[in-house]
Each structure stands twice: as C-alpha cells, then as structure tokens.
Image: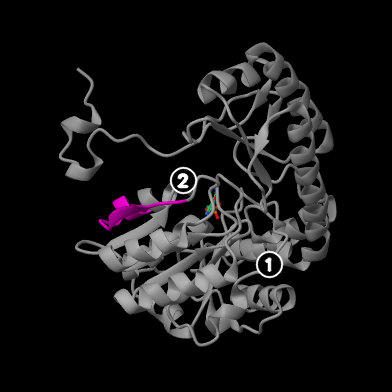
Amino acid sequence: MNTRIDDLPVRDELRGKSPYGAPQLDVPVRLNTNENPYPLPEPLVERIAERVREAARHLNRYPDRDAVELRTKLAEYLTRTAGHEVGPANVWAANGSNEVLQQLLQTFGGPGRTAIGFEPSYSMHALIARGTGTGWISGPRNDDFTIDLAAAEKAIAEHRPDVVFVTTPNNPTGTAVPPETVVALYEAAQAAKPSMVIADEAYIEFSHGDSLLPLLDGRPHLVISRTMSKAFGAAGLRLGYLAADPAVVDAVQLVRLPYHLSAVTQATALAALEHTDTLLGYVEQLKAERDRLVGELLAIGYEVTASDANFVQFGRFADAHEAWRKILDRGVLVRDNGVPGWLRVTAGTPEENDAFLDAVREVKKELN
Ligand code: PMP
C-alpha cells in the first residue's frame, strides 16, 4: 500500500492541506501567473552567461553570505526609481520575495503570534503564516476590493496582530492602496502592539502611483517587499528583496540560512540589474497593454476592477470556474483565484492579449 501524507506524523495544521500552485498546463496562451511575457533580451542573456561563467570559477567556495554587491545594486535601483535614498544596509535579498516573506514571519511571527491580511489577497501570505506556525487573521475589504480602513483599524485593535500585510498593488484584484491608508494602518498597528507592517510591492513598477519607499523614514516597523519576478521579467531567477530600517535587516539574519543565495543567483541578478532600463521599457509596454485589456473588457461588457498591476480582474460570472474552463477550451489559460464571480488575466504580448480578448468575447456570448 502507498503511504499517504496523512499516514506520516506531519504537523496537525498541515493535515489534509494541498500545496500552493497554479496549474502549469501546456496551452498556447498562458496568462495565469502574472509572469512577464517577454524573454530576457539577448544581450542580457549573454551578460548572464558571462557573469555566471566567472562565478562558476569559484563554486568550490561558498557565496558571499551577505550578498553585499547585489544589495548595493538593488539599493541603487530603489534610490533611482523611488526617489528615496536607501543603502545596502537597508536592503536584504533572498530566493524570491516568498522567501523574504518567510524570513520576515520566522523573525516577527511564529508560534503564539499572529499576522493579518486583507482578503482576497496574495494567498501565500496565509500559507507562509501557516508554514511558520503563525496564526492567520483574515481581515475585510470593501465590495470594490479597496481596503475598508475603519474595519481594518478595528480588526487590528481587536486582534493586536504581530504582523500586518498590505499588498499594493493587491493580487489578485490589482487594487493599489493609497499611502495615507498605509500610514493609518501603520499607526493602528503601532497603537495596538506595536507590530511590523509588511507592504508587499511585488507589482509596484506597473502602478500608476509611486512606491511606499519614502514612508520608511521614521517608521522602523515598516518593511517594503519587492521582487525581480515581475518587472524584471525574471521569475525563473528567484530573487526577491526588502527595504527597511537596518535593524530589520539585522533581525532577519537570525533566521536566514547561511549562504542561502547561491553565487549563480547573485551573478544572474547583478547582470539583470545592469539592464534595468531595457527591462523597465517592457514594463511600459505591459502597462499600456494592461490598460488596453481594461478598455476592451469593459467594451465587451465585463466588469473590471481598476488595476495598478500587470494583470486585470474581470467578471462577473455566475460560475467563475465554468467561465475559466470555457476560456481554457479556447486555448487561453487565465487564473481562477477562488474569488466568487471573478477571474484574473495577466497582461501578455499584444498577440496573446488579442487571443484572450477573442476568447472572452465568445465566452460572453455563450454565457448570455
Ligand atoms: N507577492 C505577491 C503579491 C505576488 O503576487 C507574488 C507572486 N505571485 C509574490 C509576492 C512572490 O513572488 P516571488 O517569490 O516570485 O518573488
């Protein structure tokens, strides 16, 4: 007989649970995981090969444990693009922002502690909480998916969480959170505990608005989480980073595994950062395509949630999963995040977006 997970002495909170992950189906048009549709440009591929070749000469040694060169370049990128000066002491990097968030919850959450997020939001926040033994509190949103500030402040005062997640722009809805709302949530969190506030800015480069980075001034309990998976078109690289008070960077050293960021990863990320301007050019194209998707979806007769990200939430469907299946039948994979009535499409190339729009035009007729 095959042994099943639940036959093993796994932790109680993992029993009966499924691993996170969108279906990786082999279909012509994949617009389901908010990836950047543009492969890295050839000169960058060459540069990565060069830097990795050099790194390979030293693979008998452990990598720079503190990733100082990479953190310096990431700090320069943030300073240049967010109009707020940060240095390497403010920046920390790990294997994807998921690992950054995990390190933060290992440091500031854990058994006997709680984290709150305002849902629907990025479901890994709750799962990383579970994986680190942190209790999860599901906070509310308004019907239009903006944060209901009064209800959020009330929930923070009542539950006194150790960690507050604010995802801006939010996934899966695309909703940006105004800086004044983040400030109010920060103040509520300080009054209640004080707790750490993690602003997940995975999609900020696609936003109409600015990064929250300037809010770091005088707010040592605020952490901004970023990734190279989206704007830098490097989801396969697995490079996430945070900006915060240097004390936060010192604190996560207590839980990070030594040499967690391989020399190959550091070399590749450094090469990508040399090509920032080209990559941000793709971001501009994707923003235009995102806005085109919004306009066309509205013209077809769908409802759309205002988006500041590289994806668009659209609906409403009596049965979102049925609609998801019908779109898939037409060769286009979008995401059913389990938000009743809504689906999410990632902005792809103009051709991919056209294929998606053709599919949803047909589906709209079929479902009416
Ligand atoms: N935060 C949000 C809001 C996301 O949507 C994602 C990816 N889907 C991540 C973090 C994690 O990204 P990565 O680990 O690739 O940096």
The three-letter code of the residue at mark 2 reads Pro
Residue 141 is labelled as none
Identity of the residue drawn at 63% across and 79% down:
72
Identity of the residue drawn at 53% across and 25% down:
320
Magenta span covers which residues?
Answer: 128-141
For disc 1, the marked residue is 270
State the image coordinates of residue 85 (x, y, percent, origin top left).
Answer: 66, 84
- Foreground: 328 or 185? 185
- Judge whether 218 appears above or below 343 on screen: below
Front disc: 2 or 1: 2
Left or right: residue 17 compared with residue 27: left
Left or right: residue 9 compared with residue 58: left
- Judge whether 352 appears above or below 263 on screen: above
Q: How would you rate the neighbour count of disc 1 (Cα within 10 Å): few for under 14, some for 14-19, many for 20 or more?
A: many
Identity of the residue drawn at 34% across and 74% down:
195
The three-letter code of the residue at mark 1 reads Leu
For disc 2, the marked residue is 120
Q: Earlier in the sequence, mark 2 or mark 1?
A: 2
State the image coordinates of residue 143 (x, y, percent, origin top left).
Answer: 50, 45
- Judge whether 330 appears above or below 155 on screen: above
Does residue 92 appear in this view? Answer: no
Does residue 309 appear in this view? Answer: yes
